[in-house]
Amino acid sequence: MKKMISALLVCGTLLVATAPAQAAPQDPVRALKAKLVAGHGVHFTEIADWSDGTDTEQAYTNKGVLQFDAKKPAAYDIVSTAWDEEKDRVIYIDKTTYLSGALAEGLPKGKTWYKYKGGGGLPYLYGQILNPAESATLSALLRKGTTAGNKVTGKIAFKDLAKVSPWFSRSELSTWPGGTEVSYTLTLTSAGLVSKLWSSFTAKSVPDDYSDYEGSTFIVDTRYTGWGSKVSVKAPNPKTVTDKLTS
């Protein structure tokens, strides 16, 4: 019996000694910058939940694509489905935002898209507030977070996010208190690219226009695929677009 135990201990030692170590992810910012090529981008899907602290409900599912220029995300196309099955779509290209579906009420007859200059960030509350395709944003998340294996967990305040993220700065949330904190967890591939991003923040002392959301928590779980794949975001047919609303 003693000989058997000794043999097992020796075998176990050999197995531990020869087991391949898990490779640490490559530098995420460098990996991202290698993918920032004009005409290429990344696809994503996400689930957005709302919570009052007691109950949590799925609010939206979103599916979209980000298109890059040589330095950053330059355009996007997002299709969203709400809890009540209403659908809407947002396209941002050439510094212009186009809205259709539930987001574009009061369109004149024959028009299906409303456009306005600007935007380019979060089109509504129920979307990913953090954009890991922005190199400065990704750098901030890595710097403020704690890395364990292939996960980075941390918090970042709105005011700090506004300094590094055009995605956030052009969004409706940029008017919220700067001290609002976003909790997040990044999951990285072995190549250093973001495969998942979970984020959560709670509405506190919000502007009057958002008073109905006071105390609510928004949780978004996003999955990224096809980093560096060829993508093409196009503006809607001009015949279907208006910059006027009837109501």
Image (tube, rainbow, N blue to C red):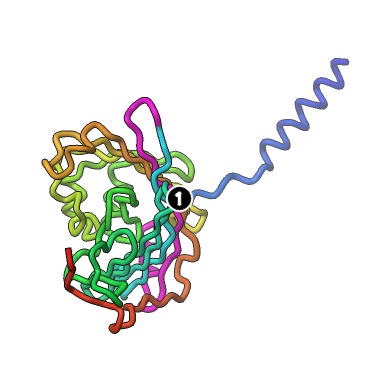
Question: What are the residue bounds of the magenta stretch?
Answer: 26-55
Q: In the rendered view, would you say 107 is above or below 197?
A: below
**Rendered image quadrant of residue 209:** top left
- The residue drawn where x is 80% and y is 22% is 6
Q: In the rendered image, is residue 201 in sight?
A: yes
**Rendered image quadrant of residue 239:** bottom left
Q: Residues within 10 Å of mark 1 (few under 14, many from 20)?
A: many
- The residue drawn where x is 76% and y is 29% is 10
* Residue nearer the viewer, 191 or 74: 74
Residue 4: image x %, image y %? 86, 22
Residue placed farthest to the top in the image? 1
Is residue 41 within the magenta segment? yes
Type of amino acid at the residue the image marks with label 1 = Lys
Left or right? Give the position of 223 relative to 22: left
- The residue drawn where x is 18% and y is 68% is 245
**Rendered image quadrant of residue 62:** bottom left
Residue behind mark 1 = 196
